[in-house]
Image (cartoon, rainbow, N blue to C red):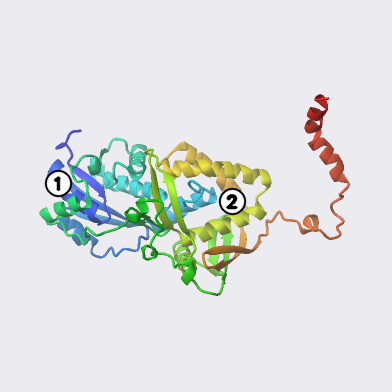
Amino acid sequence: MPKGEVKKVVLAYSGGLDTSVIVPWLRENYGCEVICFCADLGQGEDLAGLEEKALKSGASKLIVRDLREEFLREYVLPTMQAGAIYERKYLLGTSMARPIIARHQVAVAEAEGADAVAHGATGKGNDQVRFELTYFALNPRLKIIAPWREWTIRSRQDALDYAAEHNVPVTATAEKIYSRDGNLWHLSHEGGLLEDPWNEPEEDMYQFSASPQSAPDEPEYLTLSFEQGVPVAVNGERLGLVELVERLNLIGGRHGIGRVDLVENRLVGMKSRGVYETPGGTLLYTAHRELESIVLDKETLRARDRIAIDYADLVYNGRWFTPVREAYDAFVRVTQRNMTGDVRLKLYKGNIIIAGRRSPFSLYNEDLATFGPDMVYNQKDAEAFIKLYGLSIKVQALSKG
């Protein structure tokens, strides 16, 4: 479908510089109506003036949806329960956000009778893949417009000049140092001095977390309670999922928890450096893992760990709406049936120290594990077990003469 044949497009809109200039660019280059769609994922930005901004940029309307609960329950929790961590560090905050945004963007396009969708992802990054694979999966008939792969804008100053020329209201300046993406789960930082992996991040870059040096000098104890793998309470107080994550972000951030500096492998083939702040998510991952240690048997835990790497890859690579992800989720849901209990953590200057775990479904048997006198385990039985377990090793040694 060449330019000029698009009648109505739904743009994934944040109100930032890039998506603000995309609105008039779409109107100018495609001659189409532009509807802006904004997903509230708890990014903490003021959405009050967003509609006026979108309309002044040339959009016909702005549609905002509060997706915080859905984001956490349907995307974050399954990923956490799968133990998915990309390249040993990244808790996938941006990766999980893109499919839910694109899913609702497609729904808005269908409801509004649009024949196209657009996004502001660049041609260098992962987000273009995450958006477009979701479009393919949910409505492959929609035309996809990715301005960064078409237009002549190549720098922040170019975008600012275009905005000024088209009377687009923007608050951005050319001095912006970092590219950031935030939601209820995390905040990412890229660009600026971070582009040299030898450079240490500046302390004033961080927004979610205090430095470990300035964190409280006294440790804080925190108890997290789970029911079938879902966090339900903090220090005995039952909270809704959104409020619970907000509470943990404050607690973890106060103690400098959840900072990650990662040189990662992007799907498009290059390495990039990102610094992430995920205080609440780090607390949840840690507590969930500790509860698993007493509830899951060895074989199930090993199987879940094998899935975790593939699950992280498919989330990072934008393959959320695929049969394999649904199949992994089916397995993981079974592992969560008995994941009910409490985990006590001690937080101190960027560290999470495990202070205790308990569950009515615990497989830990003190009578078996004790180093004191016991009447349950007959240590003489170990001799026959070792002989059978090591039989193949013994045979190999004997065969060598």
Q: Is residue 37 above or below residue 207?
A: above
Tag of residue 19: none
| For discs 1 and 2, the disc positioned in front in the rendered view | 1
**x and y percent of residue 179 in the render?**
32, 54
- Distance from label 1 to label 2 (Cα)? 49 Å
Q: Callout 2: helix, strand or loop?
A: loop
Q: Residue 103 in the image: x percent, y percent? A: 35, 46
Residue drawn at x 12%, y 57% is 167
Residue carrying label 2: 336
Residue drawn at (66%, 60%) of the image: 359
Q: Return the residue nearer the eye: 307 or 324.
A: 307
Tell me the element at label 1.
helix
Residue 246 sits in which quadrant? bottom left
Residue 339 in view in this figure? no
- Of the 4 image quadrants, the one containing the N terminus is top left
Amino acid type for the residue under numbered disc 2: Gln
**Circle 2 residues within 10 Å: few <14, some 14–19, many ≥20:** some
Quarter of the figure that contains the C terminus? top right
Q: Disc count in the image? A: 2
Residue 292 point in image, percent of width and height:
62, 53
Question: Mark 1 highlights which residue?
Answer: 27
Q: Amino acid at mark 1?
A: Arg
Residue farthest along the front direction in this orientation: 198
Q: Give neighbour class at mark 1: few <14, some 14-19, many 20+ (Cα, 10 Å).
A: some
Of the numbered discs 1 and 2, the one sitting upstream in the chain is 1
